[in-house]
Image (tube, grey):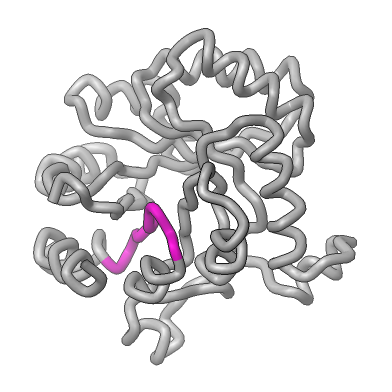
Amino acid sequence: MNNSPIIVALDDVDIEKLLKLSANLSDYVFSFKLGLEFFSKYGPDGVLEFTKKNYPIFLDLKLHDIPHTVYRSVYELCKLNINMLTVHLSGGLDMLLAAKKARDEVDPNVKLLGVSVLTSLNDTDLERIGFRYAPLDQVKNLYKLAEDAGLDAIVCSAWEVKSLKKDQQNIEFVTPGIRLEKEIRENQISDQKRVMTPKQAFEAGSNYLVIGRSITNSTNPIDSCKEIYNSFI
């Protein structure tokens, strides 16, 4: 399954448990996602525990600050031998260009991903924040920033991918908010709001699917990976 598009979200802070899970799943996934909760506890040294074992790591910190701060942060983070890193597209073009400059200087092989609209937000949430647009239109605006900055991929829900795919082929799509059909039917989607099944997301044009508890909470994570993979391939 070396061509697997599955990114497993390691949403836990027990590093020994996560290292063991990664060892078991490394042949069945594209990457493992470590987020802010993990990084807050273990920092760069925790990330290195994975990358020194050659586990591909998607570091999902969603950097969002002034251009100089993001430049320095990306410069240091890209030294950790990760394969993906996120920045918030709403940080603006100058910030995104600074991030790309730092990435290019340290390790051009790290995919730089622009986060658009979190999958935990819907129309009502965006309106309350003060955005004038519905999620699809907001993602389209942010996609243009990712394109102008020369980023490698955009992070958005699978709901937006099909529409965006019609007009471009250069940027990849990484889609969180992936839930199994049974989980959606039984409303077991946690704090996600814009969700799709793996099959629906892949057919919509997603390049990578971020899947967490559907795999990590399974009694047999390897079988769950295989089952998800076989559902859309």
Left or right of 165? Residue 50 is: left
Q: Is residue 143 magenta?
A: no
Q: Dividing the picture into quarters, in which one does residue 63 lie? A: top right
Residue 179: image location, x then y, percent = 38, 73
Q: Dividing the picture into quarters, in which one does residue 194 lie? A: bottom right
Residue placed at 75% from the left, 21% from the top? 67
Residue 228: image location, x then y, percent = 22, 69
Residue placed at 24% from the left, 43% from the top? 18
Residue 221: image location, x then y, percent = 15, 61
Near-viewer residue (220 or 158): 158
Residue 214: image location, x then y, percent = 29, 68
Image quadrant in which the C terminus is located? bottom left
What stretch of residues is rendered in magenta?
205-214
Q: How many marks?
A: 0
**Looking at the image, residue 169 lies above or below residue 91:** below
Q: Say if residue 61 shows up in the picture.
A: no
Left or right of 193? Residue 142 is: right
**Looking at the image, residue 65 lies above or below residue 134:** above
Residue placed at 10% from the left, 66% from the top? 223
Left or right of 173? Residue 220 is: left
Residue placed at 61% from the left, 31% from the top? 150
Q: Dividing the picture into quarters, in which one does residue 79 lie? A: top left
**Looking at the image, residue 24 lies above or below residue 209:** above
Which residue reaches farthest top? Answer: 105
Q: Say if residue 143 shows up in the picture.
A: yes
Near-viewer residue (50 or 151): 151
**Looking at the image, residue 67 lies above or below residue 90:** above
Near-viewer residue (217 or 59): 59
